[in-house]
């Protein structure tokens, strides 16, 4: 007798014979089928829908309500995502019509729906989907918020593919998506690989124009998202259609997180980015709660926080095109990608996995709250930002990448790595203990791993701060560093601003005031070479064997749709130099905003 967990035989649903399964839909394993409080019991689902003779939704009863997405590409496979849900009275669309609330989940505590939807996918080498290379079917139900995740397999390395979803045995289809596999691990890449890097997209605070620009330019191969994909706050916005509905309160329950994710996925620019590029995402704090750490957050702790975190994690895995990695525990999203011999991308989780206590209350952890506790603990040797299990894995990844001869190590993490001080009253004390500045021993261990392993060409990517920071990776106080030449650095940090989230200074701050504050930050931090506070946006990286070129883009006005973008600054990192290139100064000696060390603002 076949296992209920591997139902691939023909079963009778709604009076029709349909070849499909539940376990082909990876959303049922989100994030872990080994943890009953986080996953969905496929045996229970299959019993309810198959043994009880439950029916299928007809094509007229369901729609593809939130577009398509792909992510976590490997050389031979990629994750595909869509949502096929009950949505009466609408036509198939990749945008939820204004004022219409789709079904996100059954009411908390109510029994799940007895109906299932059958979805199939096709992957082809052409946009017309005539040269099909992979296909499959699966069911989705209210148990996973009607989301669908497939792993498309048997693909070729570094190849562009097109995909589409269908309601089984019908003409109802999703939009066509485009995706791309990564090069094989030992493959020499014959051209630069281009990345767009994002963080911190707060829906009520502005329009997601930054997501649209690389799609219009067709300028990148892959998207890296460093977290704060959503915000859990009670939404409030003066902008048209920017109040996430139906969650008009802060998110706590599984229904809340599902609805919030669904509301964000109505933004057309975000939908466009997901449809055009494969994403490699990781979370920060706001996917769960503000300044979350191992055992709590700014406004929740104890069992309330534990329940909240379980709901947030499950919702995130259902809605994001992300793989399960080795599920040795319940919250692992840290993982690596080998993009040929060109680079290894290492995605860390410096927020949710096993972080020691962070800033709770007060003003930036400096005044009030638990600032006194943090100042006592900040230098403790056993204090960790990522947990010791992840730390060991990270250092192993760096060593293995260097040993195999990959040209670059690109590390995605959430919070700014370099030391940052305002230099108030002559003090060099960092101003934000929520960043790596609050975990000094952990940062020292990273530098020690780079030094002892003689690891070159490390580029740290950071988000979270809602401002742009470009620095040499300098182990201040432990290794000599020359801020003029960059000698003594271990690599480079590229930290991007937010897509829309409020910045280091209030949104009404004049540009010249923001630039003046950037100038002070540049002057007080020797490793900091460019800093910018005024613009929201993103940055792109063009990665080749000889060099990396990073371009920082600002959006002229996030309060209106389709704002123009401005090239704010451009930086060069040469292979083997382990610092920002000086030619004769960083960034060519000029930028459009902020402050540039030994340069000018045009």
Image: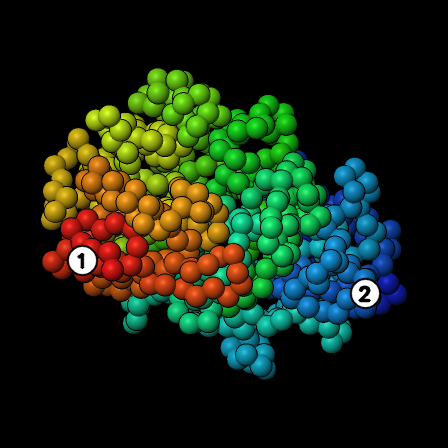
Q: Give the Cα separation between the discs numbered 2 and 1.
A: 58 Å
Q: Residue at x 69, y 72 (%)?
A: 173
Q: How many marks?
A: 2
How would you rate the neighbour count of disc 1 (Cα within 10 Å): few for under 14, some for 14-19, many for 20 or more?
A: some
Side of 336 relative to 56 (left or right)? left
Which element carries disc 2, helix, strand or loop?
A: loop
Image location of residue 536, percent across then percent down? 42, 53
Which element carries disc 1, helix, strand or loop?
A: helix
The quadrant in which the C terminus is found is bottom left
Q: Residue at x 42, y 59 (%)?
A: 555
Callout 2–callout 1 Cβ contact below 8 Å: no
**Compared with residue 29, is residue 342 higher up or lower down, i.e. above or below?**
below
Image location of residue 371, percent across then percent down? 40, 21
Locate residue 251: give its quadrant: top right
Q: Can residue 166 be seen here? A: no
Which residue is more in the foreground, 349 or 504?
Answer: 504
Side of 310 relative to 540 (left or right)? right
Image location of residue 98, percent across then percent down? 70, 61
In the image, which disc is placed on residue 135? none
Locate residue 516: give its quadrant: top left
Which residue is more in the foreground, 445 or 592?
Answer: 592
**Compared with residue 471, is residue 291 higher up or lower down, i.e. above or below?**
above
Q: Which residue is mark 1?
A: 589
State which mark lies toward you, 2 or 1.
1
Q: Residue at x 59, y 40 (%)?
A: 233
Which residue is more in the foreground, 495 or 512?
Answer: 512
Side of 168 relative to 33 (left or right)? right
Side of 597 relative to 13 (left or right)? left
Image location of residue 129, percent across then percent down? 58, 79
Q: Which residue is mark 2?
A: 89
Q: Earlier in the sequence, mark 2 or mark 1?
A: 2
Q: Residue at x 50, y 29 (%)?
A: 294
């Amino acid at each position: 007798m076949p296992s209920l967990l591997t139902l691939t035989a023909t079963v009778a649903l709604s009076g029709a014979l349909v070849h499909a399964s539940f376990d082909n839909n990876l959303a049922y394993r989100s994030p872990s089928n080994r943890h009953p409080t986080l996953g969905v019991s496929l045996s229970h689902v299959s019993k309810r829908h198959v043994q009880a003779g439950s029916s299928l939704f007809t094509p007229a009863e369901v729609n593809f309500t939130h577009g398509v997405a792909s992510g976590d590409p490997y050389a031979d496979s990629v994750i595909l995502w869509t949502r096929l849900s009950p949505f009466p009275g609408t036509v198939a669309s990749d945008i939820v019509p204004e004022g219409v609330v789709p079904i996100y989940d059954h009411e908390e505590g109510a029994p799940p729906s007895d109906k299932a939807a059958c979805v199939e996918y096709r992957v082809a080498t052409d946009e017309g989907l005539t040269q099909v290379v992979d296909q499959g079917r699966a069911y989705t139900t209210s148990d996973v918020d009607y989301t669908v995740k497939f792993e498309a397999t048997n693909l070729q390395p570094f190849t562009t593919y097109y995909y589409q979803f269908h309601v089984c045995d019908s003409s109802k289809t999703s939009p066509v998506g485009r995706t791309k596999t990564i090069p094989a691990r030992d493959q020499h890449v014959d051209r630069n690989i281009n990345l767009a890097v994002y963080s911190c997209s707060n829906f009520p605070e502005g329009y997601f124009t930054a997501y649209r620009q690389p799609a219009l330019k067709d300028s990148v191969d892959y998207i890296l998202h460093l977290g704060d994909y959503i915000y859990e706050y009670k939404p409030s916005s003066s902008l048209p259609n920017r109040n996430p509905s139906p969650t008009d309160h802060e998110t706590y329950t599984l229904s809340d997180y599902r609805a919030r994710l669904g509301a964000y996925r109505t933004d057309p620019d975000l939908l466009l980015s997901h449809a055009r590029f494969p994403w490699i995402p990781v979370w920060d704090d706001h996917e769960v709660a503000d300044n979350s750490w191992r055992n709590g957050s700014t406004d929740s702790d104890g069992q309330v926080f534990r329940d909240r975190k379980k709901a947030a994690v499950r919702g995130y895995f259902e809605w994001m095109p992300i793989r399960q990695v080795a599920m040795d525990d319940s919250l692992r999203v840290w993982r690596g990608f080998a993009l040929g011999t060109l680079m290894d991308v290492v995605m860390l989780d410096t927020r949710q996995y096993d972080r020691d206590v962070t800033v709770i209350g007060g003003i930036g952890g400096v005044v009030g709250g638990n600032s006194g506790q943090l100042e006592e603990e900040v230098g403790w040797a056993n204090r960790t930002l990522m947990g010791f299990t992840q730390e060991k894995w990270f250092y192993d990844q760096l060593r293995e990448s260097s040993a195999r001869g990959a040209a670059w190590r690109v590390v995605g993490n959430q919070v700014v790595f370099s030391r940052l001080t305002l230099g108030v009253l002559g003090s060099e004390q960092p101003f934000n203990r929520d960043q790596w500045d609050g975990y000094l021993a952990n940062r020292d261990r990273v530098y020690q791993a780079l030094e002892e392993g003689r690891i070159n060409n490390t580029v740290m990517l950071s988000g979270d701060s809602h401002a742009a920071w470009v620095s040499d990776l300098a182990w201040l106080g432990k290794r000599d560093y020359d801020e003029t030449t960059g000698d003594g650095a271990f690599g480079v940090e590229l930290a991007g601003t937010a897509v829309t989230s409020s910045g280091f200074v209030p949104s009404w701050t004049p540009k010249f005031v923001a630039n003046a504050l950037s100038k002070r930050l540049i002057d007080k931090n020797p490793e900091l070479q460019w800093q910018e506070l005024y613009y929201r946006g993103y940055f792109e990286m063009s990665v080749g064997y000889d060099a990396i070129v990073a371009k920082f883009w600002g959006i002229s006005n996030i309060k209106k749709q389709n704002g123009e973008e401005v090239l704010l600054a451009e930086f060069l990192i040469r292979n083997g130099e382990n610092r920002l290139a000086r030619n004769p100064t960083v960034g060519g000696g000029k930028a459009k905003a902020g402050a540039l060390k030994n340069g000018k603002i045009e």
